[in-house]
Amino acid sequence: MSNPAFEFDHIHLISQSPQDAVARGAPQIFLALGGKTLIVRGQRPGEAPTATREMQLYADYSSHNTWGTNHFGFLYHGDLRAFCDELHTKGVRFPVPLKEGVGGRLLCYVAAPDGVSIELMEGSRPRR
């Protein structure tokens, strides 16, 4: 799967021990996005994962307020407002609705499986 309107931008992790965050002994899915690879791994032997908290709104930021993956972000090269409207019609949930972010670009957060959030940020118009 590849969609040129999306460009991988970042992953935001909160970790007490970054050195221990390695994937061993678990099934993994590799997804190519914007020339980068997103790896989604399953449960490792002996792990007992707990659910991620919902995204919480604070005075001037948003956070899951838990260790681990807070969110991952993509630039959307197109009309982000129109794309979000389309997602709304499909029943997509937005824990942080479309708003103006730092630097004046539009952004929002989309709810993904397992309590993870996806940040969509306004990028440039689609490349041709």
Image (tube, rainbow, N blue to C red):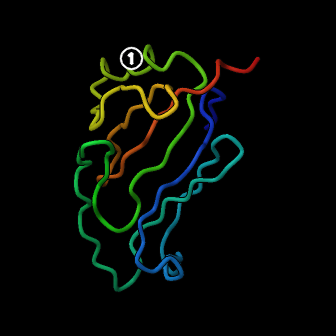
Q: Is residue 123 left or right of residue 90?
A: right
Q: Is residue 125 above or below residue 28?
A: above
Label 1: few (<14), some or many (≥20) within 10 Å?
Answer: few
**45 vs 125, nearest the viewer:** 125
Residue 108 falls in image quadrant = top left
User: What residue is rendered at 36% in x and 16% in y?
Assistant: 85
Position of the N terminus, as image quadrant, is top right
Q: Is residue 11 left or right of residue 52?
A: right
Residue 78: % across, % down: 57, 18
User: What residue is rendered at 41% in x and 65% in y?
Assistant: 14
Q: Is residue 19 left or right of residue 96?
A: right
Residue 4: % across, % down: 66, 28
Position of the C terminus, as image quadrant, is top right
User: What residue is rendered at 64% in x and 47% in y?
Assistant: 32
Total numbered badges shown on the rendered structure: 1
**29 vs 87, nearest the viewer:** 87
Tell me the residue that label 1 is attached to: 86
**26 vs 68, nearest the viewer:** 68
Residue 17: % across, % down: 45, 80
Q: Amino acid at mark 1?
A: Glu
Q: Is residue 107 above or below residue 42?
A: above
Q: Is residue 17 above or below residue 115?
A: below
Residue 76 falls in image quadrant = top right
Q: Is residue 82 above or below residue 7?
A: above
Residue 60 falls in image quadrant = top left
User: What residue is rendered at 24% in x and 46% in y?
Assistant: 58
Furthest residue toward right = 128
Dot 1: what SS? Answer: helix
**128 vs 81, nearest the viewer:** 81
